[in-house]
Amino acid sequence: MEIRVNLDVMMARRKISGGELAERVGITPANLSVLKTGKAKAIRFSTLMALCHALECQPGDLLEFVED
C-alpha cells in the first residue's frame, strides 16, 4: 500500500511551473521536488492547504491511496 502524489498532474493541468508553485506555496523548489517524486515521508497540513489553494484543487486531487 502506498500514497501516490499526483502533484505533477495537477501542475500540468494548471500550467504552472515548479518554481512558480514553490514560490506561491512558500517552500523551496527542492522540497517541492521531494513531494512530486513521492519521496516525502510526511506533509504538513499547512503545506497541503497552500498547495490546494495555489492549484485550486482538493487534497484528494493531489493524494491517492494505491494498493500494491
Image (cartoon, rainbow, N blue to C red):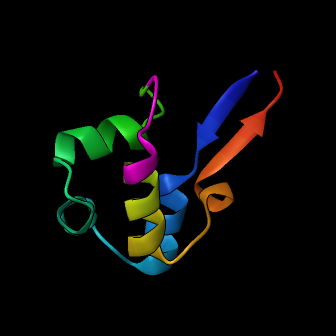
> Percent from the top left, x then y, of residue 60?
68, 56
Quadrant housing the C terminus? top right
Q: Nearer the viewer, residue 45 or 29?
A: 45
Tell which of 44 and 36 is nearer to you: 44
Q: Is residue 4 above or below residue 24?
A: above
Please state the horizontal and vertical placement of residue 50, each as a whole percent of the image. Answer: 38, 62
Q: Position of residue 59 (x, y in %)?
A: 61, 57
- Is residue 31 on the magenta stretch? no
The residue positioned 16% from the left and 47% from the top of the image is: 28
Does residue 21 lie above or below 27 as drawn? below
Q: Say which residue appears at 48% left-offset and 33% top-offset.
A: 38
Q: Main secondary structure of the magenta part?
A: loop
Range covered by the magenta-colored residues: 41-46
Residue at 46% from the left image edge and 47% from the top image edge: 45
- Up the image or down, 14 lies above or below 37; here it is below
The answer to if 42 sits in the magenta stretch is yes
26 lies left or right of 1: left
